[in-house]
Image: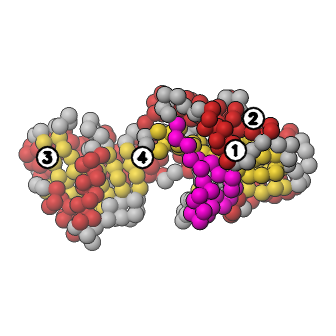
Amino acid sequence: MNLHEYQAKQILRSANITTPRGIAASSAEAAVAAAAELGGEAWVVKAQIHAGGRGKVGGVKLVKSADEVRALATTLLGSVLVTNQNAPDGQPVNQVLVEETLPIARELYLSLLVDRETERVAIVASAAGGMDIEEVAEATPEKVLTEICDPLLGVQDFQCRALAFALELTGEAYKDFCRLLPALYRVFMANDLSLLEINPLVVTADNRVLPLDCKMSIEDNALYRHKDLAALRDDSQIDAKEAAANAANVNYVALTGNIGCMVNGAGLAMATMDLIQLEGGTPANFLDVGGGATPETVAQGFKIILLDANVKAVLINIFGGIVRCDVIAEGIIQAVREVGVKVPVIVRLEGTNAELGRRLLAESGLAILAAASLTRAAKLAVEKAQ
């Protein structure tokens, strides 16, 4: 789950990490009031979306009067901002962050993330921070520095010093960085983050270091122990189908094909999608209703799948273990009647009471095709989708 910049900075400030003063606003008048409260003669107005690259498409601008604040906020609020990280559909701007300006001498890059290869937290830093960090990493990877954290010891002093020297920090900036990095690591661990990105991390004219921007991603599987963070979820920033899946507590990922998939178990779902591809089709989604699927869960799954207008057929692949196949069959029948499914539905049941489940489907009087094997089910789904 991603957070908005203003939310991430609130978490940093709660950990005694200094950030620029800023106020989030959801209307142009609120943005003008925020600028007045902050004081000064210039402000930065930032569109709040769950994507980077805002500055390159007009989502982050320096303004120097209340009229400019009002005009820019009016332009951004209610618009859809398309960046290189959320193309082609973009994301809606429902809030802007109005921030004080700072005298910036240098822009650095700093992030903490989970390194899947080493199974540890990695610190990534570069002296070439700012909007073009992706290009820097691709063209000159030697400018990107990495330190791997020991899971028992966390960030160690020698790592802070090594990165500070490599970033050519001196004096107060050096001290600030060596205090900041362990604090960021504590925030990362305490909140079960998968990414904490500071871009840019700025060195000010008076040689101090602080985060000018902040991006945070929280591990979804840890949200159950962070109810306060889960409450910050903004479903307007994600696919409508994925938002519905979050509400229904099922695992859904939107794809670009035309065969809707509903499966119980992530491994079985992957195998189902592979077979659809093998037979010449393309899956429209990944949808895992879980090992304890109920008729209600199946009905919700149907509703989510059919939110996608590209779906031309639905393939249901259920292994009856914890839940019997006849119970799942009853749920499928109930869901097809309730939702009013207009596309072909292919069902493959295997496991406990599979034969009874197939008989219930056959006797339902509905246009549901039962397949005895997964291969046959995939073939049927591809044929019907075409």
| Drawn side of residue 183 relative to residue 37, left or right | left
Q: Which of marks 2 and 4 precedes in the sequence?
A: 4
- Per the image, the residue denoted by label 4 is 117
Q: Which of marks 1 and 4 precedes in the sequence?
A: 4
Can the viewer see residue 186 in this picture? yes
- Per the image, the residue denoted by label 2 is 175
Residue 93, position as x, y percentages in the image: 65, 53
Residue 379 in which image quadrant: bottom left
Q: CA distance from mark 4 to mark 2?
A: 31 Å
Which numbered disc, 2 or 3, marks the residue closer to the eye?
A: 2
Residue shown at the point (91%, 45%) measured from the top left = 40
Residue 162, position as x, y percentages in the image: 64, 41
- Per the image, the residue denoted by label 3 is 350
Q: Are marks 4 and 1 in contact (CB under 8 Å)?
A: no
Q: CA distance from mark 2 to mark 1?
A: 11 Å
Q: Which of marks 3 and 4 precedes in the sequence?
A: 4
Q: CA distance from mark 4 to mark 3?
A: 36 Å
* Residue span colored magenta: 124-149
